[in-house]
Image: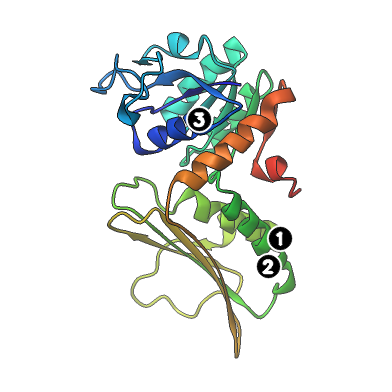
Amino acid sequence: MRVAVAGASGRMGRMLIEALRASDDMVLAGALDVAASPAIGSDATAFLGHASGVAITADLRTGLENADVLIDFTRPEGTLAHLAVCSELGVKAVIGTTGFTDAQKSEIAACAQRTAVVMAPNMSVGVNVTFKLLQMAAKAMATGYDIEIIEAHHRHKVDAPSGTALKMGEVIADALGRDLKECAVYAREGVTGERDPSSIGFATIRGGDIVGDHTVLFAGIGERIEITHKSSSRATYAQGSLRAVRFLADRKTGMFDMFDVLGLN
C-alpha cells in the first residue's frame, strides 16, 4: 500500500516513516509538512541516511497524489484540511490527532461518508487492549469504587487531559451508563467538599520526555485496583498505525476505530 505521512519532519512523523521503510507491504508515497518547516523540499528519509525520492511538501495535492492512505498525527485544524482533500481524492486516512471538538468530530464523520477513516486517540495496540480491560473492570465495579485517571506526558504536549485519558473516561462512563460530560472532574483546588461518588476524576502531569503514562485507579473500601499502561517509545503508535492501514485495504468508506482494527468489538 502507498502511504503518505503528515507532519513528516516531526517526532511522530519520523517514527512513522521509519516504520514504513521497515515494512514489507507498504511504501512511503508522500510526505507533508507546514510551509514554514525548514524540511520542505528535502528527502523524507534523509534523516535515516537514505534517499526515498519522496520530497517533503506543503502542497496537499502533491503530497497525496500517489497515496492510498494518509497517516496524520498533527493538529486538529491541519488534520481537517488534510482530510477534506483526502475525501475529494479518494485517499483513506488513519488519524491519531487528538484535541478535536465535537463539531470537528462531526466534520470527520461527514468525510468518512466519502472515504474510509480509522480514528483513535491512541494507536497503540496495548493501549486499546487496556481500553477493553477498563470496560470490563468498570462493569464489574460499578458501585463502591471511586474512579480516577492519572496521565503524564512530555513537556511539549499541548492538550490536556490527553486524548487517551479522555478516551479512557469515555469507555468507563459508557460502561457505567453515564455521560462523561456530566461526571468528569478536571480540576480540584481549595475546599471542594466530599467526592461525588458518580464522578470520574482526571489528573494531568507534564514534564521532561515522558512518552505517555496512563493509570486508572478504582479505589474501594479496603482495596484498590490500578490498571496502567506506560509507553517508552512512539514505535508502538507507529506499528498500530500500520495495522490500521492494513485494515483499510479493502474498505472504501466508513468510520472505524482501533477496536474495529483489533477485533475488540
- In terms of secondary structure, where does tag 3 sit? helix
How far across and down, in percent of the image, does residue 35 sit? 29, 18
User: In this rendering, would 126 be left or right of 142?
Assistant: left
Tag 2 residue: 138
Tell me the crowding category of disc 2: few under 14, some 14 to 19, or many 20 or more residues within 10 angstroms, Cα based. many
In the image, residue 11 sits, relative to residue 53, either above or below, namely: below
Could you tell me how far apart the alpha carbons at marks 2 and 3 are, in whole angstroms?
A: 37 Å
In the image, residue 19 sits, relative to residue 2, either above or below, namely: below
Q: Which mark is residue 175?
A: 1
Q: Residue at (51%, 9%) from the top-left corner?
A: 65
Could you tell me how far apart the alpha carbons at marks 1 and 3 are, in whole angstroms?
A: 36 Å
Q: Nearer the viewer, residue 98 or 251?
A: 251
Q: Residue at (49%, 38%) from the top-left corner?
A: 100
In the image, residue 105 sits, relative to residue 5, either above or below, namely: below
Q: Residue 20 carries which label?
A: 3
Q: Which amino acid does label 3 sit on?
A: Leu
In the rendered image, is residue 84 in sight?
Answer: yes
How far across and down, in percent of the image, does residue 20 sit? 50, 30
User: In this rendering, would 243 be left or right of 80?
Assistant: right
How far across and down, in percent of the image, does residue 5 sit? 46, 25
Q: Which amino acid does label 1 sit on?
A: Ala
Tell me the crowding category of disc 1: few under 14, some 14 to 19, or many 20 or more residues within 10 angstroms, Cα based. some
Name the image quarter holding the N terminus: top right
- In terms of secondary structure, where does tag 2 sit? helix
